[in-house]
Image (cartoon, rainbow, N blue to C red):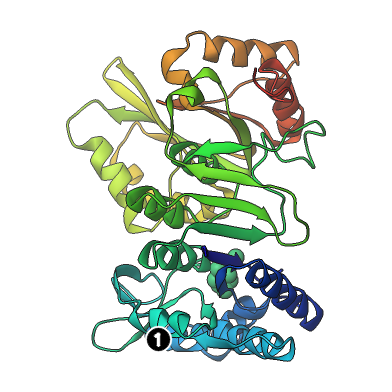
């Protein structure tokens, strides 16, 4: 008998009919001779609705109370899914984060998992019960409710799979798996049979939001192999796992895009120790998440820095930099919105050369101008004008023949 952990996201439990479908799917998995533990999200829109109410009530709601509030979303769905299972004759029980023994640390609304005590779940499973666990929530050792950050039900699922030593962990969602690129943009994008944790993380951090990044990091750390697949059909999905030697034969696994980016460039910065730290410090204090950070060798004693960020942070960034720029007589700030980022990701890059050249040539041939360039060991990212991002994705996808399954 295999133990299968299934995670159902907010869309999959978004209506009562869908909840019935989830229950039916769980029953089917159980009837095939498996033990089933489902981790579910709040019904779609519920978490956002709760946040909206809190914000309407108070400009700066207490994060402790936000956690208490947000955790109710998942509690509704576990009870409803369990009732639907009962209706199908399945012996099932709902399990809150606390009952699942998910102990957390860190700050409210961003709890991190400290350790797990799955004994209550074990006991129920031994009695033959099917379990429905609330995603996104845990409890501090002294009993305070924590939530695990947006999309945190993914993390719950991976953690529950690790704690119960599940045989299979399925992330059931509204997409069929992880694709070489968003199929709405690149028509011949291909579903990947497998992808490494590191590639999945790079794809997620560069715009392909299939799963919460922290949950992928957690899976990597604890070696939890999981599959991303559709909750609406039985197609095999994408297996996410530690890389193996064969995976390096593929140069680029996939292409992801991120829209609504903006660039800030500061010129005329004195070429002295500590300047970069002050600039980044000012942006960090204003809690601006920078993406690319590029600086050039100083020229005539002055350096030049460029950063990208989400365009909604642009105003905040300008304000945060103002005091420092006022101090620096020769400095100038220049901003540009309406850009987008294209990233090509693949662990094969480590052992193949000419990858950047292929990518830049493809963009050049398509008449697309490249703004900034940044690389990591397994990623090459460029910014382009936002109006050209879809053409850029198609050009790079074609250049690496991503529509064809590797031999
Ligand atoms: N309900 C939470 C959210 O919307 C957690 C989740 O869906 O994974 O972020
Ligand atoms: Mg979600």
> Above or below — where is 230 with respect to 348?
below
* Quadrant in which the C terminus appears: top right
> Dot 1 corresponds to which residue?
99
Residue occupying image coordinates x 46% and y 68%: 156
Q: Where's ligand 2: which quadrant?
A: bottom right
Q: Position of residue 257 (x, y in %)?
A: 63, 38
Q: State whether label 1 is within 8 Å of ligand 1.
A: no
Residue occupying image coordinates x 47% and y 86%: 127
Disc 1 is placed on an element classified as loop
Q: How many marks can you see?
A: 1
Q: Position of residue 285 (x, y in %)?
A: 32, 57
Can residue 66 be seen by looking at this rendering?
A: yes
> Above or below — where is 268 with respect to 314?
above
Q: Position of residue 311 (x, y in %)?
A: 58, 49
Q: Nearer the viewer, residue 154 or 261?
A: 154
Residue occupying image coordinates x 69% and y 16%: 399
Q: Residues within 10 Å of mark 1 (few under 14, many from 20)?
A: some
Left or right of residue 362, residue 242 in this image:
left
Can residue 335 be seen by looking at this rendering?
A: no
Left or right of residue 50, residue 191 in this image:
right
Q: Nearer the viewer, residue 344 or 93?
A: 93
Q: Nearer the viewer, residue 220 or 306?
A: 220
Left or right of residue 247, residue 295 in this image:
left
Q: Position of residue 367 (x, y in %)?
A: 74, 15
Left or right of residue 93, residue 328 in this image:
left
User: Residue 7 appears in which quarter of the rendering?
Assistant: bottom right
């Amino acid at each position: 008998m295999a133990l299968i952990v299934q995670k159902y996201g907010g869309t999959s439990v978004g209506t009562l009919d869908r909840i019935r479908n989830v229950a039916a799917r769980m029953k089917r998995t159980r009837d095939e001779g498996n033990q089933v533990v489902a981790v579910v999200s709040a019904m779609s829109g519920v978490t956002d609705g709760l946040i909206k109410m809190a914000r309407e009530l108070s400009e700066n709601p207490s994060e402790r109370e936000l956690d208490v509030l947000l955790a109710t979303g998942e509690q509704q769905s576990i009870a409803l899914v369990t009732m639907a299972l009962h209706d199908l004759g399945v012996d099932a029980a709902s399990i809150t984060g606390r009952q699942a023994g998910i102990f957390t640390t860190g700050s409210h609304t961003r709890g991190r998992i400290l350790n797990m005590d799955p004994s209550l779940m074990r006991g129920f499973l031994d009695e033959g019960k099917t379990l429905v666990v609330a995603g996104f929530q845990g409890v501090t050792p002294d009993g305070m409710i924590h939530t695990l950050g947006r999309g945190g039900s993914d993390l719950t699922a991976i953690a529950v799979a690790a704690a119960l030593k599940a045989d299979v962990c399925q992330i059931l969602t509204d997409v069929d798996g992880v694709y070489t690129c968003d199929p709405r943009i690149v028509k011949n994008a291909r579903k990947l049979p497998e992808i490494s944790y590191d590639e999945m993380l790079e794809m997620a951090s560069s715009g392909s939001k299939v799963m919460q990044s922290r949950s992928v990091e957690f899976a990597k750390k604890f070696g939890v192999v999981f599959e991303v697949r559709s909750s609406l059909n039985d197609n095999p999905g994408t297996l996410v796992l530690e890389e193996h030697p064969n995976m390096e034969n593929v140069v680029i696994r996939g292409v992801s895009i991120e829209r609504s980016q903006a660039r800030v460039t500061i010129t005329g910065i004195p070429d002295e120790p500590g300047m970069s730290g002050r600039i980044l410090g000012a942006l960090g204090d204003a809690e601006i998440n920078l993406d690319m950070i590029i600086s050039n060798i100083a020229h005539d004693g002055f350096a030049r820095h460029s950063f990208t960020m989400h365009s909604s942070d642009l105003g905040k960034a300008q304000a945060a930099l103002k005091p420092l720029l006022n101090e620096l007589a020769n400095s100038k700030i220049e901003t540009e919105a309406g850009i987008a980022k294209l990233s090509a990701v693949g662990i094969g890059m480590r052992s193949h050369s000419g990858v950047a050249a292929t990518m830049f040539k493809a963009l050049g041939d398509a008449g697309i101008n490249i703004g900034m360039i940044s690389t990591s060991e397994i990623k090459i990212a460029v910014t382009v004008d936002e109006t050209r991002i879809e053409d850029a994705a198609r050009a790079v996808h074609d250049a690496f023949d991503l529509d064809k399954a590797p031999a």
